Image (tube, helix red, strand yellow):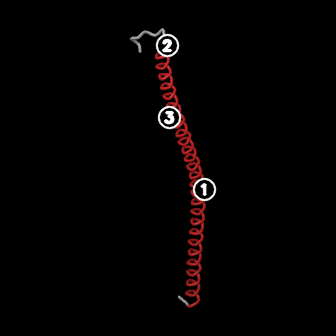
Amino acid sequence: MDTGAVIVLVLVAVVVVALLALLVIRTRARRTEQRREEAGSHYEEAAARQLDADRRSAEAEERAARAKREAAAAQQQALEAERHRSEAAEHETRARELDPDAETSER
């Protein structure tokens, strides 16, 4: 082979290697961009789910606080009812003590 043919073959080989390298770089860049987009979608989904979880947690805390208030109100009502029963019993006892028509066995 003469020198000119060798130079042409070397130049063609260099061009082919350069084109392959460019192809590899573009493929990697495209793949990297696709992964960025996919990661962005996942970040958005994670943020949306976190907001939903926060909302649900706040609702649960509100329900728990409401239940606690209701339990306290129910306990207060039970105490008041017991106090009224006690007062009623005291009045009945005092009425029997004062009632001249009440039988002596009831006193």
- Choose the circle earlier in sequence order: 3 or 2: 3
Q: Is 46 above or below relative to 71? A: below
* Mark 1 Cα shell of 10 Å, populated few (<14), some (14-19), many (≥20): few
**Residue at numbered disc 3:** 75
Between disc 1 and disc 3, the foreground one is 3
Type of the residue with mark 1: Glu
Q: Is 24 above or below relative to 66? A: below
Q: Is 12 above or below relative to 78? A: below
- Choose the circle earlier in sequence order: 1 or 2: 1
Q: Nearer the viewer, residue 22 or 91?
A: 91
Q: Which mark is residue 99?
A: 2
What distance separates the C-alpha of mark 3 from that of mark 2? 36 Å
> Would you identify the image quadrant in which residue 2 lies?
bottom right
- Residue 50 coordinates in the image, percent (x, y): 56, 53
Please, which residue is most extreme toward the left here? 105
Q: Residue at x 59, y 89 (%)?
A: 4
Type of the residue with mark 2: Asp
Between disc 3 and disc 2, the foreground one is 2
Question: Do the CB atoms of the residues marked 3 and 2 lie less than 8 Å apart?
Answer: no
* Mark 2 Cα shell of 10 Å, populated few (<14), some (14-19), many (≥20): few
**Residue at numbered disc 1:** 44
What distance separates the C-alpha of mark 1 from that of mark 2? 81 Å
Q: Is 72 above or below relative to 20? A: above
Q: Which mark is residue 77?
A: none
